[in-house]
Image (tube, helix red, strand yellow):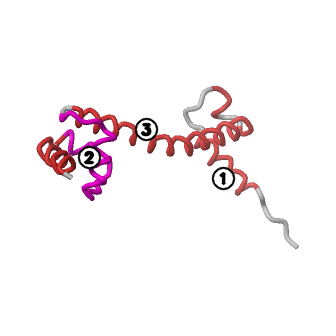
Amino acid sequence: MSRAPRAVPSRLRRKRVLKAAKGFYGRRKNTITVANAAVDRSMQHNYIGRKLRKRNFRALWIQRINAAVREYGITYSQFIAALAKANISVDRKVLSELAISEPAAFKALVDQALAA
């Protein structure tokens, strides 16, 4: 049986890790054992950050909607409950965009929700 050369895949693996570690400080960017740990940890933070971004944006949209409906004398929770009662299903991202860019359309939604 012939011997399989292992230099190519291991070099490619190391290159991939060191490329991902580009921009890190100290030995984390050029020593493979330290870079491996740093890249693994950075990927974990990356994964968690993708979940946090969704959470943060939803909180931002809720704050914007709350600020917009306070002008009409109701709270965010009353507004969302009124929308549900009126059978209007618009997500929070679109509601916050309407509140910012189309105040007239948002006012119409508020009036419809309060009428129900």
Tell me the kind of residue under disc 1.
Leu
Highlighted range, magenta: 72-100
- Residue at x 14%, y 41% (from the top left corner): 103
- In the rendering, at what x and y percent does residue 44 appear? 61, 42
Query: What residue would you read off at disc 1?
Result: 12
Q: Is residue 80 magenta?
A: yes
Q: Residue furthest top?
A: 26
Amino acid at pointer 3: Asn
Q: Left or right of 45: which side holds 5?
A: right
Mark 3 is surrounded, within 10 Å at the Cα level, by few (under 14), some (14 to 19) or many (20 or more) other residues, namely few
Relative depth, front residue between 70 and 62: 70
Q: Earlier in the sequence, mark 1 or mark 2?
A: 1
Tell me the distance, in whole angstroms, between the alpha carbons under discs 1 and 2.
48 Å
Residue 101, image x, y percentages: 17, 41
Give the structural element (helix, strand or loop) at label 3.
helix
Q: Which residue is mark 2?
A: 95
Q: Amino acid at mark 2?
A: Leu
Residue drawn where x is 52% and y is 41% of the image: 49
Q: Distance between the Cα atoms at labels 3 and 1?
A: 37 Å
Q: Is residue 84 magenta?
A: yes
Tell which circle, 2 or 3, labels the residue nearer the N-terminal end.
3
